[in-house]
Amino acid sequence: MSRSFYDSARTRSEIVSLEPKHGSRGHSPHRGRYRQLGDLLFFICVLLAGLPAIAAGPTGGLTIAWTNDMLTISGFDIPGGKVDVWYLEAFCRSGSTHRDWRQTTIPHKTELLSAAGKGRRLQLRTLVEPEIEVLHDIRVGRDDIDFRLTLKNRSDKFVDLQWFQPCMRVDRFTGRNQSNYIDKSFIFTERGLTTLDKTRRTEEAVYHGGQVYVPRGINLEDVNPRPIGLDKPVNGLIGCFSADSNYLLAMAWDQTQELFQGVIVCLHNDPRVGGLKPGETKKLHGKVYLIPNDAEALLKRYHRDFPK
């Protein structure tokens, strides 16, 4: 029969407190002292067992899993229980803004190489036609998920791979649906943290619905063919508030092609690649943050993780 941690600790306490034999002269004068020592040892064991949870903070104990192009971030204290990221939705060519989406996407396939640390680390490989290899090293932090990507052009020709799309689903986290989640979602503009319902939105595009926010320096012909907002993001953060407003969920990358509010209750920071020359290698770094609702703390983390 299996025994719990409590049962084992209780047994140890009882063993420590056993009195030596003194015939019929009654209890040992040291019995009380031994029992106190046993109780103290039990208390210390319980305290130490709880330290990892204390150190992990309110969103501690995060784990990750990947299957069928879906990265799942799980944790007991995550609002909604989990966050799903379509990883990855698409790899994209230039000239995408005013044409059929099928002419923009490049065929790709991702496979799991390894899963280690009981849900704390994943390694993936994506093959993008014709001969682009993308290696992903994804690790769980205390309250974030860290992405380290290496992209290698193994062909002898230039490959017009401009950007790609990790699609973060936020319906469970925000408690909202497609019709009303934008007032729970935000980017940073020259006005500071700006919820998406307060941005200057447009409607005309090849495909209606959603909103694209394009950083300065990015060609407006090379983004998602959905309405382009008039506000320019001042950093690479896009995120949302939890249903109870106690937490923030945000995504950032060190190179950004666009920030995108999509049409399946999703938010994107779509990383920029900028094409790959024959034999060229590029590296990208990304984060997903799950932290208490503190915009200033989020900005500090972002600037620490992505120094300019």
Image: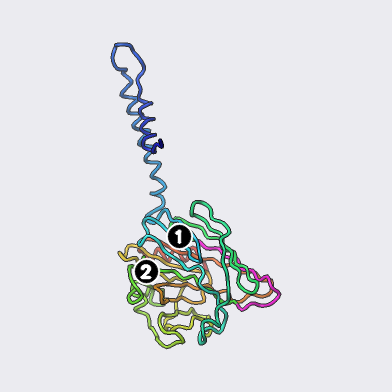
- Label 2: state its secondary structure: helix
Outermost residue to the top = 24
Q: Position of residue 41 (x, y in %)?
A: 38, 33
Question: Would you identify the image quadrant in which residue 293 lies?
Answer: bottom left
Q: Looking at the image, how many numbered discs can be counted on the residues?
A: 2
Q: Amino acid at mark 2?
A: Asp
Q: Position of residue 304 (x, y in %)?
A: 48, 63
Q: Which residues are magenta?
A: 146-160
Residue sitting at x 58%, y 67%: 126
Label at residue 302: none
Question: Would you identify the image quadrant in which residue 152 lies?
Answer: bottom right
Mark 1 surroundings within 10 Å by alpha-carbon count, few (fewer than 14), some (14 through 19), many (20 or more): many
Q: Is residue 178 above or below residue 207?
A: above
- The residue at which mark 2 appears reads as 171
Mark 2 surroundings within 10 Å by alpha-carbon count, few (fewer than 14), some (14 through 19), many (20 or more): some
Q: Amino acid at mark 1?
A: Asp
Outermost residue to the left = 26
Name the side, left or right, on which 167 lies relative to 104: left
Residue sitting at x 34%, y 13%: 22
- Label 1: state its secondary structure: strand
Q: Position of residue 247 (x, y in %)?
A: 35, 63
Residue sitting at x 36%, y 17%: 20
Q: Closest to the observer: 2 or 210? A: 2
Q: Is residue 18 above or below residue 243?
A: above
Name the side, left or right, on which 196 lies relative to 107: left
Q: Closest to the observer: 189 or 35? A: 35
Q: Closest to the observer: 47 or 113? A: 113
Label at residue 144: 1
Residue sitting at x 52%, y 86%: 99
